[in-house]
Image (cartoon, rainbow, N blue to C red):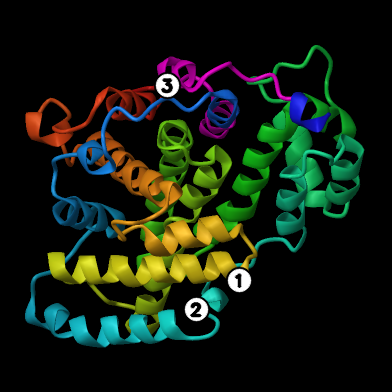
Amino acid sequence: MFLQWFRGRSNAQAALAAPSHAPRMMANTAAIAAADAATPVALMATPHALAPALDDAALGHLFHAWLHGKTAADPRAAAQHKVLLDALQRLAASPGAGAHLVPRVPAIIPQLLRSLRDEHMSGADVSRLLAQDVVLVAQVIRAANSPFYSPRAPIQTIESAILLLGQNGMRALLAQVAFRPVISTQTGKLARVAAPQAWRHAELCAQAATLLAPRLRANPFEAYLAGLMQNVGLIVAFRLFDQIDPDLVLPRSEPFDAAVAVHARALSARIAALWELPPSVVEALSGASDPEASALARTLVLADHVAKLRVLVDAGVLNATDPATLAGMDDAALACFARLAAPDA
């Protein structure tokens, strides 16, 4: 059966401990396979105890400043708080929820993702669906020939590639192919600066969510999708701000950043629904701040925090040796943080 094809590691702890030497996308693929194969362990702490000690609002403020590169405390920027937030709130409440500000995912992607969740779907069935999009075919074959998989002979057909990648490898690859243009295709000054940083964080958040999902009893692949979708609404917000003022310098304000984050999360959830992602992913994106949130939403909160710490430490904004930076994180969260380190770090 198609579910048996992926030759991943046997448990999530192996994924957490493995050296980070493969390309980021392929590391994500292995992590998903390992997490899917894992038997969820008993929780060692409540979700609240798992949260790092660094204040969420302060961390979010540092993250936003890192994303767009520079901020200003001048009166002109501060005066635009209400204008920007009102426009963002209206967009989040609109029927299209800003979907026109990001490229739409290929039409075949939702159908393929649904197929990969079906235990009775054969490789031939998936191959026929995939063949409808020549770009996806090329991406799959290229991934199958990468050093991570090191096939004995070059992979030349989509059928051979699917057999090699397996269900979980296909899931990760399709998600990457679908969402990368959403983040990388930007034109405005603010969005163009923020896009590469946002994509890096989204990839790390997706990987962290996959690794942490089993111990919070969440579905690893749904956690991966939620992590990748995390910043779509934020990019939409930055594109909106570019349209309002092409020369805008964002205000240096923690309350402003917190308000943008709330509206951006709502946008991410609405766009995920428009793209026909699983309802559980939409719910996790929209309900992550709810204390009664689902296991997937709690996984996303923790993964988002760990990924933000990782990118800010890697960028030199935070110091991992400072006791306050990683305070409050348990062994699994610390292992996940270490696993997210760049290969050359």
Q: Amino acid at mark 2?
A: Ala
How packed mark 3 is, by other alpha carbons closer than 10 Å (few <14, some 14-19, many 20 or more), is many
Secondary element at tag 2: loop
Q: Residue at x 27, y 76 (%)?
A: 248
Number of the label disc, if any, that sits on residue 97: 2
**Magenta stretch: includes residue 20:** yes
In the image, 246 versus 256, the foreground residue is: 256
Q: Residue at x 50, y 71 (%)?
A: 270
Q: Which corner quadrant of the image does residue 276 belong to?
A: bottom right
Range covered by the magenta-colored residues = 6-30
Residue beneath disc 1: 274
Contact check, label 1 and label 2, Cβ < 8 Å: yes
Q: Amino acid at mark 1?
A: Leu
Q: Which quadrant is the C terminus positioned in?
A: top left
Residue beneath disc 3: 16
In the picture as drawn, the residue positioned furthest to the top comes out as: 152
